[in-house]
Amino acid sequence: MIEIITEPFKYDFMVRSLVTAIASGIMLSILGPFAINRNMGFMADAMAHATLPIIAVGVFLGFSISELGVPASILIALFLGYIIKNSNVGEDTAIGIIFSSFFALGFILISVLNVTINLEDLLFGQILAVSQFDVFIVIAMCVAVVSLVIIFFKQLLFYSFDPIGAEVKGLNTNFLNYLFLIILSVAIVASLQTVGIILVLSMLLIPAAASKQITDTFVPSIYVSIVFGVFSSVSGLFLSYFFNLPSGPTMSLVATSIFVICFFISKLKEVRV
């Protein structure tokens, strides 16, 4: 049994993949409960898709996805936050416009600039291809995301549950809004190589949704979400190795399985009550 567990780590690429999977699982899962509480699922999806034009231009200029992570995430967060706040067409509509137009622009730029990007890896992730440099970048982003959440936890919590009350209390809600958008976009961009543009939303929301089924309060749901997220990432990586499956979709399906189990557990509790 121990040999089966340790077998993949005979290879350096699996060690790099494991570290990246854990870091991505922590980043996305710690933000998931906040995103669900603020109904930001669609926003997160738009952020992931909005990275495509920046990635296309960056690859054309000779940069990797990891090197583009921080500047790309900040630009995306600030732009989305500004457009949504100053648009009079409604938040969902504004996000939908940005979502579709940026994704379309990304494909146009890939064609016009004639850059070599494996779209399947970009859309669904290719964690087995991460380099040592990518690992360092993802770890740095993970530390930054977790640190900022810890430092501003009380303010973010207050703003997430009662934005009007937070403003009345004197909190800088504009700052908190943009801060959370930047933190969220950093986590999303950092996780693109792990699970890809399409599946990053599932790893952000599904572990958090699963934890919500079996916890009664917000703070414990964050801890449980992190456990579910890391377990989904690591077990999905193992399954993809042993059964020759695509890593990103496998991680997503493991997370979905956890959600289904937690859902039925919550329903059993209701029946007993």
Image (cartoon, rainbow, N blue to C red):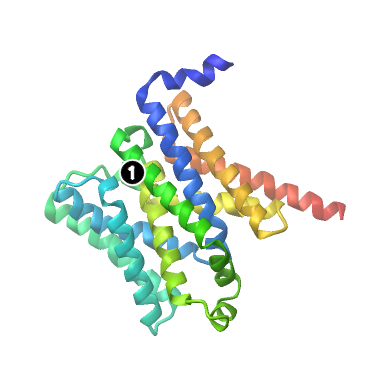
Residue position marked by numbered label 1 in the rendering: 137
Quadrant containing the N terminus is: top right
Say left or right for 134 vs 42. Answer: left
Near mark 1 (Cα within 10 A), the count class, few <14, some 14-19 or many ≥20, is some
Q: Relative to 250, does residue 192 appear above or below in the rendering?
A: below
Please state the total of marks drawn on the protein image: 1
Q: Position of residue 217 (x, y in %)?
A: 70, 59
Residue at x-position 49% and y-position 44%: 25
Residue at the right extreme, as displayed: 273
Residue at x-position 39% and y-position 58%: 185
Q: Position of residue 268 (x, y in %)?
A: 79, 49
Task: Please say whether residue 124 is visible from this viewpoint.
Answer: no
Task: Return the residue nearer the eye: 68 or 143.
Answer: 143
At label 1, which amino acid type do we have?
Answer: Ile
Q: Relative to 100, does residue 130 appear above or below in the rendering?
A: above
Q: Relative to 234, does residue 12 appear above or below in the rendering?
A: above
Q: Relative to 41, does residue 172 appear above or below in the rendering?
A: below
Quadrant containing the C terminus is: bottom right
Residue at x-position 45% and y-position 38%: 21
Q: Position of residue 52 (x, y in %)?
A: 28, 56
Task: Return the residue nearer the eye: 267 or 219.
Answer: 219
Q: Position of residue 225 (x, y in %)?
A: 59, 49
Q: Secondary structure at mark 1?
A: helix
